Amino acid sequence: MDHQMKRGLLDICVLAAIQYEDSYGYQIIKDVKPYVEISESTLYPILRRLEATELLTVRSVEHNGRLRKYYHITQAGLDRIAAFSEEWKEIMAIYRFVTREGEPL
């Protein structure tokens, strides 16, 4: 898969993982794992990039004597998911054209 496309899809997966509930790194990996394999070394740069672009915010909470970072999706992050949903319709139309899905061979 094209690197840029995969990067964008991973960003959306991470945003979707925190869409309804704040979460932390390890839990995000577990939530995304059934759909796409993602490692800690991949996740944390994504989280930093999403924070830098204000698609999510982060807060630290003490948990078992250690600080755990919880990630929260912003309105801009929710808007990005909505935009992706619209873009996906176009991507699927291109896919059907390329594969001629539904047409007899």
Image: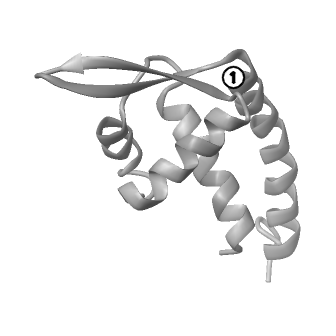
In the foreground, 93 or 46: 46
Q: Which residue type carries mark 1?
A: Leu
Residue that badge 1 annotates: 78
Q: Quadrant of residue 78?
A: top right
Q: Position of residue 4 (x, y in %)?
A: 73, 65
Residue at 58% across, 34% down:
15
Q: Is residue 13 above or below residue 45?
A: above
Q: Is residue 12 above or below residue 65?
A: below
Q: Residue 5, can we see it?
A: yes
Instruction: Describe residue 56's horizontal placement relative to residue 29 as left or right.
Output: right
Instruction: Describe residue 103's horizontal placement relative to residue 72 as left or right.
Output: right
Quarter of the image containing the N terminus?
bottom right
Q: Residue furthest bottom?
A: 105
Q: Position of residue 101 (x, y in %)?
A: 77, 68
Check disc 1 and report its element: helix, strand or loop: helix
Q: Residue 37, can we see it?
A: no
Count of numbered labels shown in the rendering: 1
Instruction: Describe residue 28's horizontal placement relative to residue 57 as left or right.
Output: left
Residue at 77% across, 24% down:
79
Q: Is residue 93 above or below residue 54?
A: below
In the foreground, 49 or 80: 49
Q: Residue furthest left?
A: 64
